[in-house]
Image (spheres, rainbow, N blue to C red):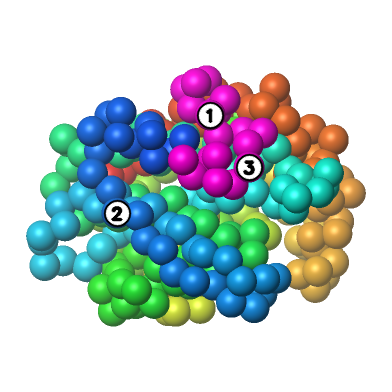
Amino acid sequence: MNDYLKALANRSNSERRDNLLNVLREHHIEFTHHHQLHCGYYDDDWIENIVVSLNPNTASKRIVIGAHYDTYGDWATKEKSLGANDNASGVVVLLKLAQYLSENTKKPIDLVFFDFEERGMSGSLEYIRRVGADHIAAMINVDTVGFGDTIIIHHKDNLELDVFADLIPKDLLLKHDVVFVPYLPSGDAGSFVSAGIPTIDISVNPQKDIQKMNEIYDKSLSKEEIFTEMEKHLEVMKTIHLAENDNIEIVSHEAINKVYEFLKEALS
């Protein structure tokens, strides 16, 4: 696991992508590398999503498990995120799932390593455009899962839907001590929500952050105000977007493994 983190954190986006592709090749995991010209949000560039499709020949709609591999900030300047917790941690979970599920599931799953999450979620929007929302059953977004001791899920109500009730029964949630939160900052999950696709966000936070998050949410603030309060008071916010603990040393293998084991059971 540590080798994966070192290959992904403190790298340019192109290096992260190349190292991710090399890991997939080393483990003989089949993948599709999509290229799509992206125009306008910041500049013209190529969106490069990487998709591992398990059981691609089934007629069933796809279950998408996604994690973005790009980082916040401009690598042409000194202002650059190391991208350790956000989101090398999530990418490691998907790499481990790809190795295990390639021989241990019959479910129609797309493991998607999204590009351009930090540029308007353009990578996930491009994936939906390419595949078609009608061909996607559900989406699980895996983001910032390397800091803390507790798995958290946003969009709790979606777990009552048949697609998630089958994947994630209540006894699995209890077994892994999952906690529900009323808010998480928008990420690639937002693209799927906007497309009408059932979606949940999975992250990891310290218990004290979860308590504080609930206190902030109870103030009935706007989403922008909630995010500002989170930046002020939550330890996990110090691990992303150029903050003081945005480094590989804070990433917990135990936290990453919690999410991996949870999803492994859900998707097998």
Q: Nearer the viewer, residue 110 or 224?
A: 110
Per the image, is 61 magenta? Answer: no
Residue carrying label 3: 12
Q: Is the residue under label 2 in contact with that under label 3 (CB below 8 Å)? A: no
Question: Which residue corresponds to the image point at 86% horizontal and 56% vertical from the top-left?
Answer: 229
Secondary-structure class at tag 2: strand
**Which of the pair 183/67 is nearer the observer?**
67
Closest to the observer: 108 or 200? Answer: 108
The quadrant in which residue 171 appears is top left
Q: CA distance from mark 1 to mark 2?
A: 20 Å
Q: Is residue 50 left or right of residue 76?
A: left
The answer to whether any part of residue 68 appears in the image is: yes
> Can residue 160 be seen in the rendering of this structure?
no
Residue 116 position, x and y percent, is: 57, 60
Tell me if 216 is positioned left or right of 9 in this view.
right
Q: Which residues are magenta?
A: 1-18
Check disc 1 and report its element: helix, strand or loop. Answer: helix
> To which residue does mark 2 refer?
32
Q: Does dot 3 land on a helix, a strand or a loop?
A: loop
Q: In percent of the image, x 44 and y 51: which residue is there?
A: 113
Residue 87, quarter of picture: top right
